[in-house]
Amino acid sequence: MHSGLFSFLRSRCSWQPEPATMGHRVRKMPSPPQSHRHHYVPIWYQKGFLEPGKTSFKILDKHPTEFKDASGVLRGRARHILNKGADAHFWEPDLYTIRWLGRSDDVIERMLFGAIDTQGKLAIEAWLAEDYDAVHSSYWNVYEFMDALRLRTPKGLRFVKALTRKETQQDLMVAMQELRRMHCLMWAEGCLEIARAPEGSSGFIFSDHPVVLFNRYVFPGDPELPHGQDPHLHWQGTQTLFPFDRKRLFILTHVEYARTPGPGKARKPRTNSRYFDPSNPMVRYDDCIRSRTLTEKQVKEVNFIIKSRADRFIAGRTEDDLYPERHLPTTVWNKLGHFLLPPKHKVINQSGYTAVQFKDGSFDFQDQFGRRPRSKAEFDREVSKAKEMRAHLERLLAKARAEKGEPPPDFGDD
Protein backbone atom coordinates (compact mmCIF):
# COMPACT_ATOMS: atom_id res chain seq x y z
CA MET A 1 0.00 0.00 0.00
CA HIS A 2 1.25 3.52 -0.82
CA SER A 3 3.01 5.05 2.19
CA GLY A 4 1.30 8.47 1.86
CA LEU A 5 -2.15 6.93 1.91
CA PHE A 6 -1.12 4.49 4.62
CA SER A 7 -0.19 7.38 6.92
CA PHE A 8 -3.71 8.73 6.60
CA LEU A 9 -5.22 5.33 7.14
CA ARG A 10 -3.14 4.69 10.23
CA SER A 11 -4.24 8.01 11.71
CA ARG A 12 -7.93 7.32 11.11
CA CYS A 13 -8.42 5.62 14.48
CA SER A 14 -10.04 7.83 17.12
CA TRP A 15 -8.62 5.79 19.98
CA GLN A 16 -5.43 4.06 21.05
CA PRO A 17 -5.66 0.88 23.17
CA GLU A 18 -4.13 1.07 26.63
CA PRO A 19 -1.94 -1.83 27.78
CA ALA A 20 -4.14 -4.59 29.18
CA THR A 21 -3.81 -5.09 32.95
CA MET A 22 -5.07 -7.81 35.24
CA GLY A 23 -8.72 -7.32 36.14
CA HIS A 24 -9.32 -4.42 33.70
CA ARG A 25 -10.95 -4.41 30.29
CA VAL A 26 -9.89 -2.05 27.53
CA ARG A 27 -12.93 -0.36 26.03
CA LYS A 28 -12.97 0.74 22.40
CA MET A 29 -14.29 4.25 21.87
CA PRO A 30 -16.90 4.54 19.12
CA SER A 31 -15.67 5.76 15.75
CA PRO A 32 -17.47 8.68 14.10
CA PRO A 33 -20.26 7.61 11.74
CA GLN A 34 -19.07 7.05 8.20
CA SER A 35 -20.15 9.65 5.66
CA HIS A 36 -21.48 8.58 2.28
CA ARG A 37 -22.52 11.95 0.85
CA HIS A 38 -19.23 13.38 -0.40
CA HIS A 39 -19.43 17.02 -1.49
CA TYR A 40 -16.89 17.81 -4.17
CA VAL A 41 -17.83 21.51 -3.84
CA PRO A 42 -17.74 22.36 -0.12
CA ILE A 43 -20.98 23.60 1.41
CA TRP A 44 -19.34 26.70 2.93
CA TYR A 45 -18.00 27.68 -0.50
CA GLN A 46 -21.43 27.34 -2.09
CA LYS A 47 -22.98 29.59 0.55
CA GLY A 48 -20.79 32.46 -0.62
CA PHE A 49 -22.92 32.60 -3.79
CA LEU A 50 -26.31 32.74 -2.12
CA GLU A 51 -28.28 35.96 -2.35
CA PRO A 52 -28.75 37.50 1.12
CA GLY A 53 -31.76 35.98 2.82
CA LYS A 54 -31.95 33.04 0.40
CA THR A 55 -31.18 29.39 1.13
CA SER A 56 -31.23 27.82 -2.34
CA PHE A 57 -29.84 28.19 -5.85
CA LYS A 58 -31.15 27.70 -9.33
CA ILE A 59 -29.06 24.92 -10.87
CA LEU A 60 -28.76 24.11 -14.57
CA ASP A 61 -28.17 20.52 -15.61
CA LYS A 62 -26.41 20.80 -18.98
CA HIS A 63 -26.90 17.10 -19.67
CA PRO A 64 -30.14 15.97 -17.99
CA THR A 65 -30.69 12.25 -17.62
CA GLU A 66 -32.47 10.66 -20.58
CA PHE A 67 -35.18 8.03 -20.15
CA LYS A 68 -35.45 5.37 -22.83
CA ASP A 69 -37.76 2.42 -23.18
CA ALA A 70 -36.66 -1.19 -23.65
CA SER A 71 -36.23 -0.66 -27.39
CA GLY A 72 -33.96 2.35 -26.87
CA VAL A 73 -36.47 4.99 -27.90
CA LEU A 74 -36.10 8.27 -25.99
CA ARG A 75 -39.22 8.86 -23.90
CA GLY A 76 -38.19 11.92 -21.92
CA ARG A 77 -35.56 13.78 -19.97
CA ALA A 78 -35.16 14.81 -16.37
CA ARG A 79 -35.67 18.44 -15.39
CA HIS A 80 -32.82 20.67 -16.50
CA ILE A 81 -33.53 23.46 -13.98
CA LEU A 82 -33.32 22.47 -10.33
CA ASN A 83 -33.86 24.36 -7.09
CA LYS A 84 -31.45 23.13 -4.40
CA GLY A 85 -29.85 24.27 -1.17
CA ALA A 86 -26.11 24.36 -0.55
CA ASP A 87 -26.06 20.96 1.14
CA ALA A 88 -28.33 19.20 -1.35
CA HIS A 89 -26.26 19.19 -4.53
CA PHE A 90 -22.68 18.99 -5.83
CA TRP A 91 -22.05 15.69 -4.12
CA GLU A 92 -21.86 12.04 -5.13
CA PRO A 93 -22.28 8.96 -2.98
CA ASP A 94 -19.00 7.47 -1.73
CA LEU A 95 -16.96 9.49 -4.23
CA TYR A 96 -13.79 9.14 -2.12
CA THR A 97 -14.60 5.96 -0.20
CA ILE A 98 -11.95 3.25 -0.23
CA ARG A 99 -11.88 -0.28 1.08
CA TRP A 100 -9.35 -1.05 3.80
CA LEU A 101 -8.98 -4.27 5.74
CA GLY A 102 -12.16 -5.61 4.21
CA ARG A 103 -14.43 -2.65 4.93
CA SER A 104 -15.25 0.73 3.44
CA ASP A 105 -13.67 3.87 4.87
CA ASP A 106 -14.29 7.60 4.37
CA VAL A 107 -10.92 8.71 5.78
CA ILE A 108 -10.08 10.78 2.68
CA GLU A 109 -13.31 12.76 2.90
CA ARG A 110 -13.02 13.35 6.66
CA MET A 111 -9.32 13.75 7.32
CA LEU A 112 -7.83 14.96 4.05
CA PHE A 113 -10.50 17.15 2.51
CA GLY A 114 -11.88 18.10 5.90
CA ALA A 115 -8.55 19.72 6.84
CA ILE A 116 -7.96 21.24 3.40
CA ASP A 117 -11.44 22.79 3.33
CA THR A 118 -11.09 24.25 6.83
CA GLN A 119 -7.68 25.77 6.10
CA GLY A 120 -8.78 26.97 2.66
CA LYS A 121 -11.80 28.75 4.10
CA LEU A 122 -9.65 30.64 6.62
CA ALA A 123 -7.08 31.52 3.95
CA ILE A 124 -9.71 32.91 1.56
CA GLU A 125 -11.32 34.90 4.37
CA ALA A 126 -7.90 36.41 5.13
CA TRP A 127 -7.48 37.46 1.48
CA LEU A 128 -10.93 39.01 1.34
CA ALA A 129 -10.44 40.85 4.64
CA GLU A 130 -6.97 42.03 3.52
CA ASP A 131 -5.63 40.69 6.81
CA TYR A 132 -2.01 40.34 5.72
CA ASP A 133 -0.80 38.87 9.00
CA ALA A 134 -3.22 35.99 8.41
CA VAL A 135 -2.42 35.91 4.67
CA HIS A 136 1.28 35.50 5.46
CA SER A 137 0.71 32.42 7.61
CA SER A 138 -1.97 30.86 5.38
CA TYR A 139 -0.84 31.92 1.90
CA TRP A 140 -0.15 28.47 0.43
CA ASN A 141 -3.43 27.14 1.83
CA VAL A 142 -5.38 29.08 -0.81
CA TYR A 143 -3.56 27.25 -3.60
CA GLU A 144 -3.73 23.87 -1.88
CA PHE A 145 -7.48 24.32 -1.53
CA MET A 146 -7.82 25.35 -5.18
CA ASP A 147 -5.73 22.43 -6.39
CA ALA A 148 -7.66 19.91 -4.30
CA LEU A 149 -10.89 21.47 -5.56
CA ARG A 150 -9.78 20.99 -9.17
CA LEU A 151 -8.81 17.35 -8.77
CA ARG A 152 -11.58 16.11 -6.47
CA THR A 153 -14.51 16.88 -8.79
CA PRO A 154 -15.85 14.19 -11.14
CA LYS A 155 -14.18 16.05 -14.03
CA GLY A 156 -10.94 16.35 -12.06
CA LEU A 157 -10.91 12.68 -11.14
CA ARG A 158 -11.34 11.76 -14.81
CA PHE A 159 -8.28 13.92 -15.54
CA VAL A 160 -6.29 12.13 -12.81
CA LYS A 161 -7.40 8.76 -14.17
CA ALA A 162 -6.42 9.67 -17.73
CA LEU A 163 -3.07 11.08 -16.59
CA THR A 164 -2.07 8.18 -14.35
CA ARG A 165 -4.05 5.33 -15.95
CA LYS A 166 -5.18 4.11 -12.55
CA GLU A 167 -8.16 1.78 -12.66
CA THR A 168 -9.12 0.87 -9.10
CA GLN A 169 -10.74 3.32 -6.69
CA GLN A 170 -7.93 2.91 -4.18
CA ASP A 171 -5.19 3.54 -6.76
CA LEU A 172 -7.12 6.56 -8.07
CA MET A 173 -7.35 8.06 -4.58
CA VAL A 174 -3.60 7.55 -4.06
CA ALA A 175 -2.85 9.25 -7.40
CA MET A 176 -5.18 12.14 -6.59
CA GLN A 177 -3.32 12.75 -3.31
CA GLU A 178 0.05 12.64 -5.08
CA LEU A 179 -1.07 15.26 -7.61
CA ARG A 180 -3.13 17.53 -5.38
CA ARG A 181 -0.46 20.25 -5.21
CA MET A 182 0.57 20.09 -8.86
CA HIS A 183 -0.65 23.58 -9.86
CA CYS A 184 0.22 25.48 -6.65
CA LEU A 185 3.69 26.68 -7.58
CA MET A 186 2.91 28.16 -11.00
CA TRP A 187 -0.19 29.84 -9.57
CA ALA A 188 1.85 31.46 -6.79
CA GLU A 189 4.49 32.68 -9.27
CA GLY A 190 1.87 34.35 -11.46
CA CYS A 191 0.32 37.80 -11.52
CA LEU A 192 -2.47 37.91 -8.93
CA GLU A 193 -5.67 39.93 -9.12
CA ILE A 194 -8.92 40.06 -7.17
CA ALA A 195 -11.60 41.80 -9.26
CA ARG A 196 -15.04 42.80 -8.03
CA ALA A 197 -18.49 42.61 -9.56
CA PRO A 198 -20.22 46.02 -9.69
CA GLU A 199 -22.79 47.08 -7.11
CA GLY A 200 -26.20 45.69 -7.95
CA SER A 201 -24.69 43.03 -10.21
CA SER A 202 -26.13 39.56 -10.59
CA GLY A 203 -22.67 38.43 -9.53
CA PHE A 204 -20.57 35.42 -10.42
CA ILE A 205 -21.93 31.90 -10.73
CA PHE A 206 -20.08 28.70 -9.84
CA SER A 207 -19.97 25.25 -11.37
CA ASP A 208 -19.28 21.62 -10.55
CA HIS A 209 -15.65 22.35 -11.51
CA PRO A 210 -15.12 25.69 -9.73
CA VAL A 211 -11.45 26.39 -10.57
CA VAL A 212 -11.49 27.27 -14.26
CA LEU A 213 -8.52 27.18 -16.66
CA PHE A 214 -9.21 29.63 -19.49
CA ASN A 215 -7.18 30.15 -22.66
CA ARG A 216 -8.71 32.44 -25.27
CA TYR A 217 -7.02 30.51 -28.05
CA VAL A 218 -7.93 27.02 -26.82
CA PHE A 219 -11.68 26.60 -27.11
CA PRO A 220 -13.74 23.85 -25.43
CA GLY A 221 -13.48 20.78 -27.63
CA ASP A 222 -10.09 21.78 -29.05
CA PRO A 223 -8.85 18.74 -31.04
CA GLU A 224 -5.33 18.99 -29.56
CA LEU A 225 -6.66 18.17 -26.09
CA PRO A 226 -8.30 14.96 -24.89
CA HIS A 227 -12.08 15.20 -24.81
CA GLY A 228 -13.40 17.16 -21.86
CA GLN A 229 -10.01 18.32 -20.58
CA ASP A 230 -8.88 21.88 -19.91
CA PRO A 231 -5.93 23.74 -21.46
CA HIS A 232 -2.62 23.03 -19.76
CA LEU A 233 -1.68 25.39 -16.95
CA HIS A 234 1.95 25.62 -18.08
CA TRP A 235 0.87 27.26 -21.36
CA GLN A 236 1.51 30.99 -21.20
CA GLY A 237 -1.98 31.90 -22.39
CA THR A 238 -3.81 29.85 -19.77
CA GLN A 239 -5.35 31.95 -17.02
CA THR A 240 -7.01 30.64 -13.87
CA LEU A 241 -10.41 32.03 -12.85
CA PHE A 242 -11.72 31.22 -9.39
CA PRO A 243 -14.69 33.11 -7.94
CA PHE A 244 -14.03 33.53 -4.23
CA ASP A 245 -17.73 34.30 -3.81
CA ARG A 246 -20.59 35.97 -5.67
CA LYS A 247 -18.85 39.35 -5.68
CA ARG A 248 -15.11 38.64 -6.03
CA LEU A 249 -13.08 36.84 -8.68
CA PHE A 250 -9.50 35.60 -8.25
CA ILE A 251 -7.58 35.86 -11.54
CA LEU A 252 -4.13 34.29 -12.00
CA THR A 253 -2.09 35.10 -15.12
CA HIS A 254 1.40 34.03 -16.15
CA VAL A 255 3.67 37.08 -15.91
CA GLU A 256 5.11 36.72 -19.43
CA TYR A 257 1.65 36.63 -20.97
CA ALA A 258 0.44 39.53 -18.82
CA ARG A 259 3.25 41.66 -20.28
CA THR A 260 2.92 40.67 -23.94
CA PRO A 261 -0.17 38.56 -24.72
CA GLY A 262 -1.03 37.16 -28.12
CA PRO A 263 -2.06 34.02 -30.01
CA GLY A 264 1.56 33.11 -30.79
CA LYS A 265 2.31 32.65 -27.08
CA ALA A 266 -0.97 31.01 -26.06
CA ARG A 267 0.36 27.42 -26.17
CA LYS A 268 4.03 28.09 -25.46
CA PRO A 269 5.33 26.90 -22.07
CA ARG A 270 6.03 29.64 -19.57
CA THR A 271 9.61 30.12 -18.41
CA ASN A 272 10.71 27.42 -15.95
CA SER A 273 7.33 25.74 -16.13
CA ARG A 274 7.06 22.90 -13.61
CA TYR A 275 4.32 21.27 -11.62
CA PHE A 276 6.42 20.38 -8.59
CA ASP A 277 9.60 21.87 -7.10
CA PRO A 278 11.38 20.06 -4.24
CA SER A 279 13.25 23.24 -3.31
CA ASN A 280 11.82 26.00 -1.15
CA PRO A 281 10.43 28.53 -3.67
CA MET A 282 10.17 32.24 -2.89
CA VAL A 283 6.97 33.96 -3.96
CA ARG A 284 5.36 37.31 -3.21
CA TYR A 285 1.78 38.33 -2.62
CA ASP A 286 2.10 42.04 -1.82
CA ASP A 287 1.61 42.90 -5.50
CA CYS A 288 -1.91 41.45 -5.77
CA ILE A 289 -4.03 43.87 -7.83
CA ARG A 290 -7.30 44.83 -6.11
CA SER A 291 -8.32 48.04 -7.84
CA ARG A 292 -10.62 46.81 -10.61
CA THR A 293 -14.40 46.59 -10.66
CA LEU A 294 -15.74 44.75 -13.70
CA THR A 295 -18.76 45.84 -15.71
CA GLU A 296 -21.94 43.79 -15.74
CA LYS A 297 -21.17 42.65 -19.30
CA GLN A 298 -17.74 41.46 -18.17
CA VAL A 299 -19.34 39.53 -15.31
CA LYS A 300 -21.58 37.83 -17.88
CA GLU A 301 -18.53 36.93 -19.97
CA VAL A 302 -16.85 35.35 -16.95
CA ASN A 303 -20.04 33.43 -16.20
CA PHE A 304 -20.22 32.17 -19.78
CA ILE A 305 -16.62 30.94 -19.53
CA ILE A 306 -17.46 29.19 -16.24
CA LYS A 307 -20.52 27.61 -17.85
CA SER A 308 -18.58 26.48 -20.92
CA ARG A 309 -15.89 24.80 -18.83
CA ALA A 310 -18.35 23.19 -16.40
CA ASP A 311 -18.76 19.43 -16.48
CA ARG A 312 -22.52 19.26 -16.03
CA PHE A 313 -23.92 21.66 -13.41
CA ILE A 314 -23.79 25.41 -12.81
CA ALA A 315 -25.53 27.36 -10.04
CA GLY A 316 -26.73 30.95 -9.75
CA ARG A 317 -29.25 33.14 -7.96
CA THR A 318 -31.90 33.08 -10.66
CA GLU A 319 -32.70 31.14 -13.81
CA ASP A 320 -31.51 34.09 -15.87
CA ASP A 321 -28.06 33.82 -14.24
CA LEU A 322 -27.74 30.37 -15.80
CA TYR A 323 -27.90 31.77 -19.35
CA PRO A 324 -25.24 34.52 -19.49
CA GLU A 325 -24.92 34.06 -23.26
CA ARG A 326 -28.30 35.79 -23.66
CA HIS A 327 -26.67 39.05 -22.57
CA LEU A 328 -23.54 38.86 -24.76
CA PRO A 329 -23.09 40.24 -28.28
CA THR A 330 -20.84 37.28 -29.16
CA THR A 331 -19.80 33.94 -27.71
CA VAL A 332 -16.89 33.41 -30.11
CA TRP A 333 -14.22 32.04 -27.79
CA ASN A 334 -11.25 34.16 -28.86
CA LYS A 335 -13.37 37.29 -28.52
CA LEU A 336 -13.97 36.65 -24.83
CA GLY A 337 -11.97 37.68 -21.80
CA HIS A 338 -9.79 40.50 -23.19
CA PHE A 339 -10.40 42.34 -19.92
CA LEU A 340 -9.11 39.44 -17.80
CA LEU A 341 -5.51 40.46 -18.44
CA PRO A 342 -4.18 42.66 -15.63
CA PRO A 343 -3.38 46.34 -16.31
CA LYS A 344 0.14 46.28 -17.79
CA HIS A 345 1.41 49.15 -15.66
CA LYS A 346 0.63 47.11 -12.54
CA VAL A 347 2.50 43.97 -13.59
CA ILE A 348 5.76 43.66 -11.66
CA ASN A 349 8.74 43.55 -14.05
CA GLN A 350 11.54 42.06 -11.98
CA SER A 351 15.06 41.71 -13.33
CA GLY A 352 17.81 39.66 -11.74
CA TYR A 353 17.53 37.69 -8.54
CA THR A 354 15.79 38.23 -5.26
CA ALA A 355 18.44 37.76 -2.56
CA VAL A 356 17.77 36.35 0.91
CA GLN A 357 20.34 36.07 3.69
CA PHE A 358 19.59 33.72 6.56
CA LYS A 359 20.63 34.00 10.20
CA ASP A 360 23.53 31.62 9.66
CA GLY A 361 24.92 33.95 6.97
CA SER A 362 24.02 31.73 4.00
CA PHE A 363 22.28 33.11 0.91
CA ASP A 364 19.54 32.03 -1.45
CA PHE A 365 18.75 33.58 -4.83
CA GLN A 366 15.72 33.18 -7.08
CA ASP A 367 14.39 35.14 -10.01
CA GLN A 368 10.76 35.85 -10.85
CA PHE A 369 10.33 32.39 -12.38
CA GLY A 370 11.93 30.41 -9.57
CA ARG A 371 15.29 29.96 -11.29
CA ARG A 372 18.49 29.92 -9.24
CA PRO A 373 22.15 30.53 -10.17
CA ARG A 374 23.26 27.80 -12.56
CA SER A 375 26.85 27.49 -11.35
CA LYS A 376 28.98 28.09 -8.28
CA ALA A 377 30.70 30.96 -10.06
CA GLU A 378 27.37 32.68 -10.72
CA PHE A 379 26.27 32.02 -7.13
CA ASP A 380 29.49 33.53 -5.76
CA ARG A 381 29.03 36.62 -7.95
CA GLU A 382 25.51 37.08 -6.58
CA VAL A 383 26.79 36.72 -3.00
CA SER A 384 29.38 39.45 -3.65
CA LYS A 385 26.73 41.73 -5.16
CA ALA A 386 24.37 41.12 -2.23
CA LYS A 387 27.08 41.90 0.32
CA GLU A 388 28.06 45.07 -1.55
CA MET A 389 24.43 46.18 -1.66
CA ARG A 390 23.98 45.55 2.05
CA ALA A 391 27.16 47.46 2.89
CA HIS A 392 26.00 50.37 0.72
CA LEU A 393 22.61 50.49 2.45
CA GLU A 394 24.24 50.34 5.87
CA ARG A 395 26.45 53.30 4.97
CA LEU A 396 23.47 55.32 3.76
CA LEU A 397 21.47 54.57 6.90
CA ALA A 398 24.41 55.35 9.18
CA LYS A 399 24.94 58.68 7.39
CA ALA A 400 21.26 59.61 7.68
CA ARG A 401 21.23 58.82 11.39
CA ALA A 402 24.46 60.73 11.97
CA GLU A 403 22.96 63.82 10.32
CA LYS A 404 20.13 63.61 12.85
CA GLY A 405 22.55 63.16 15.72
CA GLU A 406 21.43 59.57 16.25
CA PRO A 407 23.72 56.59 16.95
CA PRO A 408 24.51 54.28 14.01
CA PRO A 409 22.06 51.40 13.49
CA ASP A 410 22.91 48.00 14.92
CA PHE A 411 22.56 45.48 12.09
CA GLY A 412 23.99 42.55 14.04
CA ASP A 413 26.65 40.17 12.83
CA ASP A 414 26.54 38.40 9.47
Image (cartoon, helix red, strand yellow):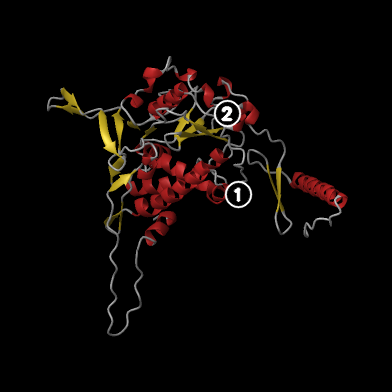
Which of 244/167 is in front?
A: 244
Identity of the residue drawn at 47% across and 31% down: 213
Image location (x, y in percent) of residue 120: 46, 47
Residue 144 appears anywhere in the view: no
Image location (x, y in percent) of residue 92: 29, 42
- The quadrant of the image that shows the N terminus is bottom left
Q: Nearer the viewer, mark 1 or mark 2?
A: 2
Identity of the residue drawn at 28% across and 65% down: 30
Name which residue type carries label 2: Pro
- The quadrant of the image that shows the C terminus is bottom right
**Residue 279 disc label:** 1
Residue reaching furthest top?
329
Residue reaching furthest bottom?
22
Dots 1, 2 in contact, CB < 8 A: no
Q: Badge 2: few (under 14), some or many (20 or more) residues near its Cα, within 10 Å?
A: many
Image location (x, y in percent) of residue 337: 49, 23
**Residue 28 disc label:** none
Q: Label 2, secondary structure: give it.
A: loop
Which of 362/198 is in front?
A: 198
Which of 49/265 is in front?
A: 49
Residue hosting label 2? 342
